Image (tube, helix red, strand yellow):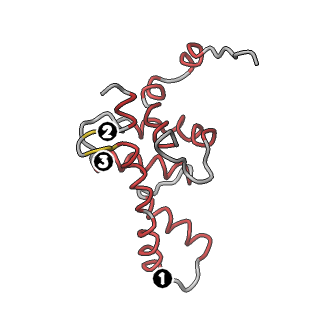
Amino acid sequence: MKPQFIPVHMIRRELDDIVCNNLPAFHAITGCDTTSQFSGYGRRKAWNVYINNASLLNRFGKEDKLTSSVLSEAEKFVIQLYSPGSTETSITALRVSLFMQKNYDATSKQECSRTTSETCTSTSEHLVFCCISQPNSSLSTRIWLGR
C-alpha cells in the first residue's frame, strides 16, 4: 500500500490559532492512549463540537495546578458534546434536564438530581485523569505541550 501524503501545513492554515493550541487537550479528553472516548461520540462528532467550543479548553493542561475553574470549563465542553447549545453548567444539571425531558412523571426532581449526581463523578474523574498524573503536575496534555 502506497503511503498517503497529507498536507498538514495546509490544514493548519485553515484552522484558528485557538483550535490548534488546544489540540492536545482535545486529544486527551476525547480519547487517547491513556483515556477512553465518551460513549457514542467518536472523533468526528467531537471535532464538530470542538471547532465551536475550542476556547473551553484554553487552560486545560497548561497550568501547574488543575483548578476547579479549569475543570468547570472542560466540563462545559463535555456538556456541549452531549447537548449542543445547552446552557447547563454542570454534567449533573444536564443529566437531570435530559432525564426530566424524557421521563417526567411523579419522580421528584430532587431524587433525580441525587441519583444522577452519583453517576456524574465518572465524568469528573475522566477529566482529572486526562490532566493529572500526580499532585500539581499534568499527564497527557502537559507532556504533549512540553511542560
Give the Cα distance between marks 1 and 3: 30 Å
Q: Pointer 3: residues within 10 angstroms few (<14), some, or many (20+)? A: few
First-in-chain label (1 vs 2):
1
Q: In this orientation, which residue lies closer to the viewer: 69 or 134?
A: 134
Label ID, residue 108: 1
Residue type at the position of mark 2: Ser
> Hey, which residue is sitting farthest front in the picture?
1
Q: Quadrant of the N terminus?
A: top right
Residue, disc 2: 138
First-in-chain label (3 vs 2):
3
First-in-chain label (1 vs 3):
3
Residue type at the position of mark 3: Ser
Q: Secondary structure at mark 3?
A: helix
Q: Residue at x 52, y 47 (%)?
A: 36
| Position in image of residue 126 (x %, y %) | 43, 52
Q: Secondary structure at mark 1?
A: loop
| Position in image of residue 2 (x %, y %) | 74, 15
Q: Pointer 1: residues within 10 angstroms few (<14), some, or many (20+)? A: few
| Position in image of residue 144 (x %, y %) | 40, 28
Q: Residue at x 57, y 42 (%)?
A: 46
Residue, disc 3: 69
Quarter-wise, where is residue 113 in the image? Answer: bottom left
Give the Cα distance between marks 3 and 2: 16 Å
